[in-house]
Image (cartoon, rainbow, N blue to C red):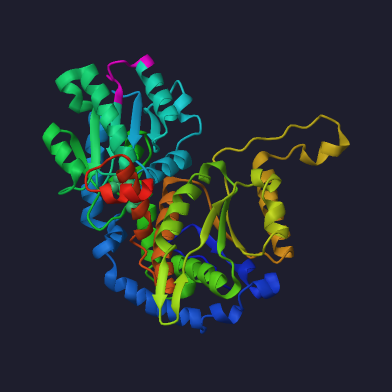
Amino acid sequence: MPTTTTSATTLTLDTDRCLSTAVHDHGLDPDVLAPSGPAAAAAVVLTQRLEKTRGTGWERWRLLAEGAMREDHVKAVKAIAEKYAGQLDNVVVLGIGGSALGNIALQSALNPLTHNLMRDRNHPRLFVLDNADPIPFHQTLGFITSEDPRFDRTLFVVISKSGETAETAAQFLIVRDMLQKARGDSHADRLIAVTDPEKGTMRRLCDAAGYETLPVPEGVGGRFSALSPVGLISCALCGIDIDTLLDGAAAMEQACRSEDLHANPAAMLATVLVELGQRQGKTVHVMMPYANQLYLMADWWRQLWAESLGKIVKGVQGVTYAGFTPVKALGATDQHSQVQLYREGPNDKAIIFLEVETFATDVAIPTGLGEDALAYLEGSSLATLLSAEKRATEFALTESRRPNLTIKFPEVTPHTVGQFMMLWQVATAYAGLMLGVDAYDQPAVELGKKATFALMGKPGFEVLRGRLES
Ligand code: PA5
């Protein structure tokens, strides 16, 4: 059965309900995935190809959790966390896209929902400002300055590989100005940057102003950078165990080097989703965690899956459009919002459930109300109810012939979260090869960026501005 469970990892992947044996003509023929079938043969070839590029070019991210790169990053990140230990109430990340989503996902998965509100917090609050929207910016900075007008207990972390991303650059200019006004020449100790170690606008600015920096390493693009200093720094500052996070990622990365499709969760995940897309037209991929902690992981995944795979492919038969539309939903909340569509709307979706076997805490439902209609809940617990809801939705979708798979977390810990992020990164590399796209570029993002430069009056973009205004 195509259920991948490897001894090196503790996440499990269950793809049984993507097969025709479960969802009839909307599923994959089990022979396609059989150990002697075509997908298994393709996995050998693709794994060998990825083995050749592993750790080179734009696939240097595969080495983030091991060896010298890991050691250097962890040492540098911990040195900063130790330097500021006990001195901070607030960490404010300025970044966008791949320079923010990992931070948000890791914080929400691994720190309590109430982290920023806790009075007995041992680590600073985390705010991630990932938009040019003036309202959250103004409100966040207003809150911080009402408590800490000189930024004595606030550290800003600007994350930008290029330093030229308009949203981040604008926020950086405002913050730098505020810091200079509040602290004068000593303002450099309240701002650190995560940027290219050698080149780029942010690099030059940091060198000139004496800001401390951490590297966005070469060969690590934004959406593959959560396990680099880009994502590690806010974790380390806010009390998340980065060693265990990277241990989990390293264990998964090793498992995903196997040429055996059934022992390689990334190859299996990519195979099932790409095959469902190409053979069965399931081009909408819904990630539906049954755990609030993992909901913002789905935002991180949406960028990875969308920006890496959504590409024009020019082949001998003309132009085709590759990629899948990632959607996020939350179980059980969205049962009351989306599941009607998922069961009876267009059968163009593959549902990716995230399930947690054991929650860090559970809440018992008391007995004694004496109301027959609610008696079934009495003496149970919220985790038991949530688990039943997931199984029920999985059953209902399968009854409606809607393919669905489950990635199960034994628990949500730094180790399993590290596994999860690496799993999807490697699965994206496989899916890119399967679809014939470059998973590491984003050419279609450029025009919008250039048009923004033109509208904002950046020199060199006058012709484009003329086109826009006409
Ligand atoms: O994945 C990507 O490459 C993008 O989302 C970038 O991370 C994002 O555009 C921010 O770029 P930068 O880090 O250069 O500011």
Identify the residue shown where x is 65% and y is 46%. Answer: 334
Q: Residue 70 or 50: which is nearer the viewer? A: 50
Q: Residue 211 or 415: which is nearer the viewer? A: 211
Magenta span main SS: loop
Identify the residue shown where x is 18% and y is 27%. Answer: 188
**Image position of 128 (left or right of 335):** left
**Image position of 274 (left or right of 382):** left
Residue 219 figure quarter: bottom left
x and y percent of residue 421 in the render? 42, 54
Residue 413 highlighted magenta (yes or no): no
**Image position of 78 (left or right of 125):** left
Identify the residue shown where x is 23% and y is 50%. Answer: 71
234 to 256, vertically: above or below: above
x and y percent of residue 224 in the render? 35, 55
x and y percent of residue 399 in the render? 74, 64
Q: Residue 19 or 314: which is nearer the viewer? A: 314
Residue 365 figure quarter: top right
40 to 330, vertically: above or below: below
Question: Magenta span covers which residues?
Answer: 146-154
x and y percent of residue 50 in the render? 33, 71
Q: Residue lying farthest right?
A: 372
The answer, for residue 246, to whether it is visible in the render is no
